[in-house]
Amino acid sequence: MNTANKLTMIRVALIPVYVALWYLPIPGQQYIALAVFIIASITDFIDGYVARHYNQVTDFGKFMDPLADKVLVLSAMICFCARGVMPDWAVIIVILREFAVSGLRLVAVDNGRVVAAGWSGKVKTASTMVCLCLMHLPIPDVMNWIAVVVIAVTTLYSGVEYFVKNRDVLNWSK
């Protein structure tokens, strides 16, 4: 297994650790969970760089890296929902966007095309991870709502952009 794939697997292994920390009655558990979330998030950026820079792009990585990102982010969002810190509609927006873009990619592959990650998708991922990190901290309610809005807006924008840029994939007249 190459370095990029090992980093992805570290991220996958950190997800249940992160979730468990939400429920352990230990002092500072929220900060420990934040540290785990930050480490997992950093592995996302490093494994992408390593994969491209050292030509370690694999089918396993193409599949597992985005899946690990989605599970990490959604796990954090669901934990925040359980605590009443994040509204469920924000999580639903993220889930709908991920299913829609995944469906678009499947249709594109069926038509012999690859829908690559766009710049707005990378901005969405980075801003979501930063906002989720902030939400672990004792920030004012207004800052928490700003973080939720940033997540929702970047998610919606990147989802719409995928469909606009690849609208020819979905030939509605068939």
Image (cartoon, rainbow, N blue to C red):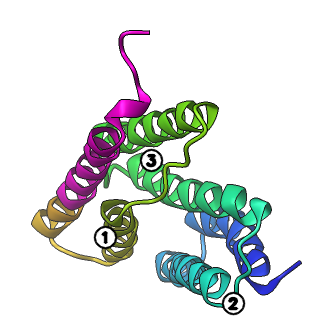
Say whether disc 3 or disc 1 marks the residue closer to the N-terminus: 3
Quadrant of the rendered image containing residue 63: bottom right
Q: Secondary structure at mark 1?
A: helix
Q: Nearer the viewer, mark 3 or mark 1?
A: 1
Magenta stretch: residue 171 in it?
yes
Left or right? Give the position of 34 relative to 54.
Answer: left
Which amino acid type corresponds to the residue marked 2 in the rendered image? Tyr
Q: Can you identify the residue that label 2 sits on?
A: 54
Q: Which residue is mark 1?
A: 127
Which labelled disc corresponds to residue 82?
Answer: 3
Sequence-wise first label, 2 or 3:
2
Query: Spatial distance from mark 1 to mark 2, Cα to Cα?
Result: 26 Å
Q: CA distance from mark 3 to mark 1?
A: 22 Å
Q: Secondary structure at mark 3?
A: helix
For the point 39% across and 67% down, the residue is 122
Name the amino acid, label 1. Ser
Q: Position of residue 37 (x, y in %)?
A: 53, 75
Q: Residues within 10 Å of mark 3 (few under 14, many from 20)?
A: few
